[in-house]
């Protein structure tokens, strides 16, 4: 059977599974809708958290970035993995003990202010829509290639599926759907990686195969081969870094602290019964996430080596079918500048004739390696599972922020539970439409857009959450001012240097790179904005009155482990 038929079969089965779970887990109360009734087991929550966390950026784009950036791409691995550890150990248990459904709910109550709640809602919506834009681009990429439908139609199909199980089941439906999606995406990521590792190095463990010798009897190490191919074409050595240490540090830290401030990940820790379960599910999720994250560098090496071997100085007329298929999507383009019919893929921009969108590397990798059609289709299903699982979590954050934190807590406190549930579903529907627009008009490749969302989360939420937990004298004036200054600074820098809004449409590629502040890229500027947030928050806090005694007592209590008092008495 062809790849397209296999894709229809596998994607159809997975979509039917997701819809079936949504019908089975229809939310009947706001608690079901927001936190799945608070009764999810640690293992189920760990799997759902892993799926929520491993978005299209992790599945589709991260290995693509590493494939093209080489050593420099390690910042994404370090930042996203380290950030999850930071979240699990530093914040999750305390937020769970505080007992609020959402991050704006925590900030609104901790800082005893409707204004703080509204600012947090605005920040959550900005972060979530920036993040969901990356997911929808991933959905469009998969649909346009493997189902051979128009990319816009692909986005619409994906959004209808998400709308169905997010609006019908809320967090309850999303949680159990994400358990299934984790199984699909991890299987889809590992199977081709194992196939190609055996094919190239004879070793079935991709992480070991990446550092092993080629299977051709030459005794040449795979990374040594890739370094040689890269330098021959004028690129830097794959294993050498070109980013400044300052930018590497800034991006890594921004991704780490951004992780700890992401509302769609934090909300998962409210779905379990006890604080102990929150810690346990965080550890389980980290283990499950590590499976993909330790494999991604190997996938990147396999994909880049196969790509260079296939296209460099080869006649265009002899390109395999996968090349033409990806050309049809517009994500891979060949321009014969010297009219010799041969593909010149070189570092020199004036001579280079091939443009490869880095988001296609994971998806095209099984085709380049000539793996069976069912494996190629499986990767397509995995990419959709990764994108849709995170998109659903983000849409829930947006809908709960509007229905619970704005309507229920600010504008209409007397609204009935049924009315709040209806408002949440309408909000999710509107959010789906806006997310679909971003998918049809994406602002960049998946991981870059997602990295900006992490920067926005770092700049806005992280200081307010950390100070709210660990500094009992932190007041509302400081937190509100810090959040506004932090996210405004990050938005300005992002719009100026990523999208050229204030420079006539110029971007870093067009020559603004040398104007970066402190030599830090937009993806890493969240670190600077976060530091400014901390400074502003603490300065304003010092100049204004302390929070009420009852608030300080709450902060003291959430830092004391459950049962500690009884243990001391014994």
Image (cartoon, rainbow, N blue to C red):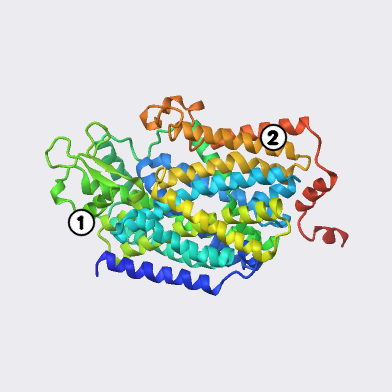
Residue at 65 percent across and 43 percent down: it is: 119
Task: Find residue 10 and report its horizontal and vertical position in percent.
Answer: 36, 69
Task: Name the residue furthest right.
Answer: 569
**Mark number displayed over residue 537:** 2
Count neighbours of disc 1 (C-alpha within 10 A) and say few if under 14, some if 14 to 19, many if 20 or more: few
Q: Which residue is mark 1?
A: 321
Q: Where is residue 421, by image quadrant?
A: bottom right
Task: Find residue 143 and report its horizontal and vertical position in percent.
Answer: 34, 58
Residue at 62 percent across and 68 percent down: it is: 41
- Relative to 439, is 509 above or below? above
Side of 111 relative to 152 (left or right): right
Going from N to C along the chain, the mark reached first, 1 or 2, is: 1
Task: Find residue 470 and report its horizontal and vertical position in percent.
Answer: 73, 44
Task: Find residue 452 and report its horizontal and vertical position in percent.
Answer: 49, 41
Side of 212 relative to 485 (left or right): left
**Mark number displayed over residue 293:** none
- Relative to 243, is 465 above or below? below
- Of the 4 image quadrants, the one containing the N terminus is bottom left
Q: Nearer the viewer, residue 332 or 144?
A: 144
Q: Quick check: can you spot residue 464? A: yes
Q: Nearer the viewer, residue 173 or 188?
A: 173
Q: Secondary structure at mark 2?
A: helix
């Amino acid at each position: 059977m062809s790849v397209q038929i296999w894709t229809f079969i596998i994607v159809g089965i997975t979509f039917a599974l997701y819809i079936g779970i949504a019908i089975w887990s229809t939310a009947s109360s706001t608690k079901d809708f927001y936190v799945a009734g608070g009764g999810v087991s640690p293992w189920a929550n760990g799997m759902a958290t892993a799926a929520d966390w491993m978005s299209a950026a992790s599945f589709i784009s991260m290995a693509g970035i590493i494939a093209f950036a080489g050593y420099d791409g390690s910042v994404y691995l370090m930042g996203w993995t380290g950030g999850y550890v930071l979240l699990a150990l530093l914040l999750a248990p305390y937020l769970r003990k505080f007992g609020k459904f959402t991050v704006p709910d925590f900030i609104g109550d901790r800082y005893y202010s409707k204004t703080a709640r509204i600012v947090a809602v605005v920040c959550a919506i900005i972060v979530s829509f920036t993040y969901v834009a990356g997911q929808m681009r991933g959905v469009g990429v998969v649909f346009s290639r493997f189902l051979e439908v128009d990319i816009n139609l692909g986005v619409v199909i994906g959004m209808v599926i998400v709308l169905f199980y997010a609006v019908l089941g809320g967090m309850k439906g999303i949680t159990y759907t994400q358990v299934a999606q984790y199984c699909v995406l991890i299987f889809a990521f590992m199977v081709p990686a194992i196939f190609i590792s055996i094919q190239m190095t004879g070793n079935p463990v991709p992480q070991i195969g990446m550092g092993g010798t080629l299977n051709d009897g030459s005794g040449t190490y795979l990374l040594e081969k890739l370094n040689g191919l890269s330098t021959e074409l004028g690129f830097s050595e794959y294993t050498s870094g070109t980013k400044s240490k300052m930018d590497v540090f800034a991006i890594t830290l921004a991704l780490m602290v951004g992780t700890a401030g992401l509302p769609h990940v934090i909300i998962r820790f409210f779905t379990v019964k006890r604080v102990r379960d929150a810690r346990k599910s965080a550890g389980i999720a980290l283990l499950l996430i590590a499976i993909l994250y330790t494999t991604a560098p190997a996938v990147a090496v396999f994909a880049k080596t196969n790509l260079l071997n296939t296209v460099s100085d080869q006649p265009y007329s002899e390109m395999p079918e996968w090349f033409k298929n990806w050309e049809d999507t517009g994500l891979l383009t060949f321009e014969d500048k010297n009219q010799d019919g041969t593909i010149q893929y070189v570092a020199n921009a004036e001579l280079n004739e091939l443009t490869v969108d880095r988001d296609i590397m994971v998806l095209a990798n099984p085709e380049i390696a000539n793996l069976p059609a069912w494996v190629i289709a499986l990767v397509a299903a995995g990419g959709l599972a990764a994108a849709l699982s995170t998109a659903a979590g983000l849409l829930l954050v947006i809908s709960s922020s509007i229905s619970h934190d704005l309507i229920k807590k600010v504008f209409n406190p007397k609204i009935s539970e049924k009315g709040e549930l209806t408002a949440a579903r309408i909000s999710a529907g509107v959010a789906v439409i806006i997310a679909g627009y971003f998918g049809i008009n994406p602002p960049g490749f998946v991981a870059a857009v997602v990295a900006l969302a992490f920067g926005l989360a770092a700049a806005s939420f992280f200081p307010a959450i950390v100070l709210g937990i660990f500094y009992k004298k932190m007041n509302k004036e400081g937190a509100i001012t810090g959040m506004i200054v932090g996210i405004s600074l990050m938005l300005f820098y992002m719009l100026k240097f990523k999208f050229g809004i204030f420079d006539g449409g110029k971007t870093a590629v067009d020559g603004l790179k040398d104007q970066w502040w402190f030599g830090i890229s937009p993806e890493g500027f969240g670190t600077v904005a976060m530091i400014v947030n901390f400074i502003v928050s603490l300065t304003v806090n010092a100049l204004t009155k302390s929070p009420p005694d009852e608030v300080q007592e709450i902060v003291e209590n959430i830092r004391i482990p459950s049962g500690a008092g009884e243990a001391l008495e014994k």
